[in-house]
Image: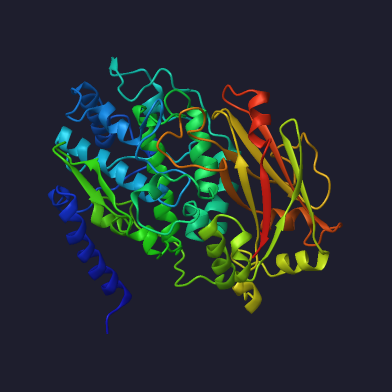
Amino acid sequence: MTTRREALTRLSVGAVATFAGVAPGLRAIAGPLPIRKEINGLALNHPDVTTLRDGVRILKGRPAGSPNWTDLATIHGTPAGFNKCPHRNWYFVAWHRAYLLMYERIIRAATGNTSFAMPFWDWTAHPAVPQAYSQPTYNGQPNPLYVAQRNNGYVVPTTVAGPSVMNTIYNVDTVFEKFGTSRPAGQNSLSPSWITSMTGLQGTLEGTPHNSIHVGLGGFMPNGNSPMDPIFLMHHGNIDHIWWTWNCKGRPNTSDNLWRDMAFANTFYNPTGTGTWTTHPSQLLDIATLGYSYGACVGRLVLGSVRTLANARLLEIYKTGTTEAAQAAGFQALTLKAQVNRGVLDAVAPEPRERLKGALDNSLVEGAANPTAQQQAGSDVIALIHNLTPPNPGVEVLVFVGAGAIPDAADAGDSHYVQTIGFFGVGDGMMDGHAMSGGVAAQVDLTAALRASTGGLPATDEIRVHLVARPVAGGTQADAEATVANAQVEVAIV
C-alpha cells in the first residue's frame, strides 16, 4: 500500500524532472535545499544578505541586454505601465513566484553562491522597513539595497498587514480564488491575453497588504517598474511565503486547467542571461522542485473543504465576475442601492431578518467544535464591489458593514470596519497592455464582521455596506471622490 508520504515523494520527484527540463540550472543544487529566511532575523553580514547585496550591485553594474537590473524590472513593467505581469486575476501569485525564482537563480549565478536563498520581509511581525534596506551605506560603502526615493521610515499599518488581516487571508479566504484573486471575468481559453486581463475580483491578499505596501513605500514601488527597488524582492518574497503557508494549512489550489495549464511563455531569463524559459502554474506548486524551501511545513492538514456548497456557489460567481449569471447555483444575490457623497458610498438593501440570521447561523466559524451539517455545507455573506476608479494609487477605500447607520467619519477602529482596499498600478498609462473594464473590482467577506456588529441578528431589515474613500501617499480628496463616484455593490449570500 502506498502511503500519502510516499505518494507525495513520487509526485515531487516527477515534478523535478518536468521543471528542470524547462528551467535549466536547477540541478546545480546538491544536498539540503536552501531555506528562505525572514530578513529581520538575519545579521547584516549573513551570507544570504551579503549575497543579495552583491547580486544587486552586480546586476545594476551590467550593461543593458546582459541582462541587467533594468532589463529584469522591465519584464514586470516600466514607469508607463505594466508589461508581462498579471495583477487583479488568479495568475498573480503563480507568476510572481516564477519571477522571484528568476532573480534568485540569477543572483546565485552572478555571485557563485549556489546555496543562496532569497530572504523575505514579514511585514506583520516586523512592520518597519528592514535595516538591510533602510541604511544608505554598509561598511562605509554605498548600500545597493538602499533607494533614496523610497519612504524608508515607512511602518506598515496594522489595518494593512496586522494579525486580523492575516487571519482573514489564512482562515476566511480558504477558496483559492478568494485568496489569490479570481479568474478574469468570462475566461474561456488558454490564450495568453488572459494573463494580463485585470478583470478578476481582488481578494484580501492582493487588495490589502500587497497593494497598500507598494503604495506606502513610495519611490518606484507604486509603479509598473516597482522591481527597480530591491525591496520588491522582499515584499513579494513574503507574498510567496504566505501562499506556501496557506497551502501548509491544507488550503488547496484550484484544479481548474484554465489556471494550471496557462503558459508563461518565454518570460523569464535563464540564470546566465542566455535565453528565456517557459513555465506553467502547475509546475510552480511544489517549491522543493524549484530549488528552495521555507523549512518545515507546519500547519493543520485538511484533506477536503468542509464548505462544499458555499465554495461551489462562489466558483460560479468567479466565472462571470458578478452574481447576474450565477443564479442557478442556488445562492441569493442583492444589488444594493447606493448613495454617494464626497468620497463616501452608502449602499443599502432590504433583507428579511430571518434569512440573514440563517446565513450567519449557518456560517462555519474557524475552529468550531462539532459543526452541524449545514455549517459544513457553508453559508457566507460576500460583497462584490465593482467599478472603483482611483485616478492614481494615492487612495484607499475602507469597507464597513452593518444593519444600521454608519458614520461617514468612521475609521478602522469602528465596530463595523471590515477591510481596507489599496490600489497598485492605477492611473493614466498604467493599464497599457492590460485588459481592464469597469474599473477595479474587489471581493470582501462580510460574514464575521456582520455577525460581530449585529450580534447575529440585525435590528433592522437591511444590509448596509459603507465605503469610505480617503487620500493616502500624496492623494487628494478629489481623487478619493473620483474613486467611488461610480462604484456598485452586490451582496451574495452563498
Q: Residue at x 65, y 63 (%)?
A: 380
Q: Quadrant of the N terminus?
A: bottom left
In this view, the residue farthest toward the bottom is: 1
Q: Quadrant of the C terminus?
A: bottom right
Q: Using the image, determine if residue 143 lies above or below residue 47.
A: above
Where does residue 62 sit, x and y in percent of width and height?
18, 23
From this viewpoint, is residue 174 visible? no
Locate residue 483: give its quadrant. Answer: top right
Q: Residue at x 20, y 65 (%)?
A: 13
Where does residue 35 sit, x and y in percent of width and height?
29, 48
Q: Nearer the viewer, residue 181 or 129?
A: 181
Q: Nearer the viewer, residue 304 or 366?
A: 304
Q: Using the image, determine if residue 87 lies above or below residue 305.
A: above
Locate residue 147: give its quadrant. Answer: top left
Where does residue 26 sit, x and y in percent of width and height?
17, 50
Q: Residue at x 68, y 30 (%)?
A: 481
Q: Is residue 353 left or right of residue 445?
A: right
Q: Using the image, determine if residue 240 lies above or below residue 379.
A: above
Q: Is residue 468 left or right of residue 244?
A: right
Q: How is the image coloured?
A: rainbow
Q: Is residue 71 left or right of residue 176?
A: left
Q: Is residue 348 left or right of residue 60?
A: right
Q: Residue at x 31, y 45 (%)?
A: 36
Where does residue 342 sit, x and y in percent of width and height?
74, 30
Q: Nearer the viewer, residue 97 or 332?
A: 332
